[in-house]
Image (spheres, rainbow, N blue to C red):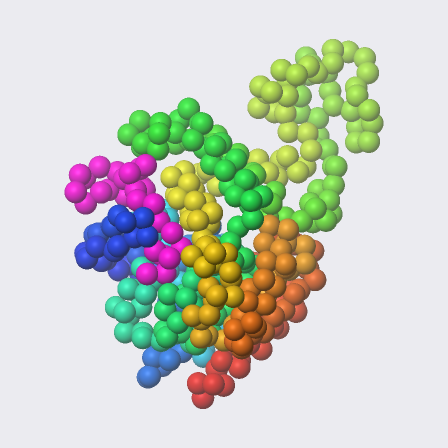
Amino acid sequence: MSFIATPQTMHFAEPLPLQSGASIRDYTLAYETYGTLNADRSNAVLVCHALNASHHVAGSYAGQPRSEGWWDNMIGPGKSVDTNQFFVIGVNNLGSCFGSTGPMHRHPDTGEVYGADFPVVTVEDWVDAQARLLDRLGITQLAAVKGGSLGGMQALSWTLQYPERMRHAVVVASAPNLTAENIAFNEVARRAIVTDPDFHGGHFYRHGVIPKRGLRIARMIGHITYLSDDVMNEKFGRSLRAPTLPASRGSLPPEGAGPARGGPAPDLRDYLYSTQDVEFQIESYLRYQGDKFSDYFDANTYLLITRALDYFDPARAFGGNLTQALARATAKFLLVSFTTDWRFSPKRSREIVKALLDNRRDVSYAEIDAPHGHDAFLLDDARYMSVMRSYFDSIAKEQA
């Protein structure tokens, strides 16, 4: 049973210097907290979110059914990250579209919607903004920073930017940087958005439109990479939906049959232009995910966040030497990866583990044999939850 979560916001008038050399001022961060901060303020856990998530990490909103936070299976009273023991903080990143200042909001100088004029942000900028929020909350040191995927990159960056402000880093299904293949997937998704006729150079709000077609395709591309081949085959296989082509163009063959025989055959126009051309179950699923995503996500936010993913590479300043890059880290680490995650493969987590061990850091590593691909970090797996519970129980004992 989920508890009731209460969204909060905090406004910052003073400028935040950004890695790009620009700055942003008069911005707001949306956040939520769960549990109680203890007397010496030592039990705080910061949770960093991935690409399309938000500060709503756990619990549900009053009067809103099916509004559970994206990591509600992990965080809450009696759960793996027990809010009876920890004060958990979820922060929505700058540039997002879920409450924190982003491209959908108005520039304080011009009064116009930022749109494409929103400054470029990086993982390091998000960490700096989170640190400012913690300052306001009176938290000088975190028990842990935890995140999955892009959130894991933020947790790793915390260990390098503010090593003295945290005791543990929990990095799940993440990597020290993106592979060329990952950058390529992001670029194809971005091109789908920027070439949508409704994009208008990022200033689509001025035209009263939204580049939904591009967003749908971007989400479909991303979603394919989050799932494993085994999961897609098990869930959908090659199953066909009921025939949906216009009767005047003939009908689809039964499952397993070859092309339809007799009557007018469907031609390419049916597949390119018909809005009823969904034949396979996997097509239906992807279109549903794309439609849903385009209803709530901001196109400029998608461009900003995927670029932040691409840019993250703490070893770049050290000639690509990750061991040297991580020498600044003093936290204890837990890293978790999943065998079928080909977007953030276990090999990438093991790179981090090796670099930390080269620096003689305290590291625990779990490689979970799970079939769900990258999405496994969000799902219930008894072994995964047990690893998390054991690790956070050990943190709680340190505080006792």
Image coordinates of residue 338 in percent, x first then y, are 64, 60
Residue 186, above or below 278? below
Whether the magenta-drawn stretch holds residue 114 is answered as yes
Q: Is residue 105 visible?
A: yes
Seen from this angle, which residue lies furthest top?
Answer: 264
Q: Can residue 70 be seen in this view?
A: no
Apparent side of residue 160 relative to residue 364 in the rendered image (left or right): left
Start and end of the magenta stretch? 102-128
Front residue of this view, candidates 97 and 121? 121
Image coordinates of residue 274 in percent, x first then y, are 59, 20
The residue at 34%/55% (across/down) is 125
Which corner quadrant holds the C terminus?
bottom left
**Quadrant of residue 383 within the rendered picture:** bottom right
Front residue of this view, candidates 378 and 114? 114
**Quadrant of residue 352 within the rendered picture:** bottom right
The residue at 43%/70% (across/down) is 328
Residue 129, above or below 42? above
| SS majority, magenta | loop
Image coordinates of residue 71 in percent, x first then y, are 50, 61
Seen from this angle, which residue lies furthest left?
Answer: 109
Whether the magenta-drawn stretch holds residue 23 is answered as no
The residue at 53%/50% (across/down) is 178
Residue 41, above or below 231? below
Q: Total number of numbered labels?
A: 0
The residue at 30%/44% (across/down) is 119
Seen from this angle, which residue lies furthest bottom?
Answer: 400
Front residue of this view, candidates 210 and 154? 154
Image coordinates of residue 256 in percent, x first then y, are 82, 31
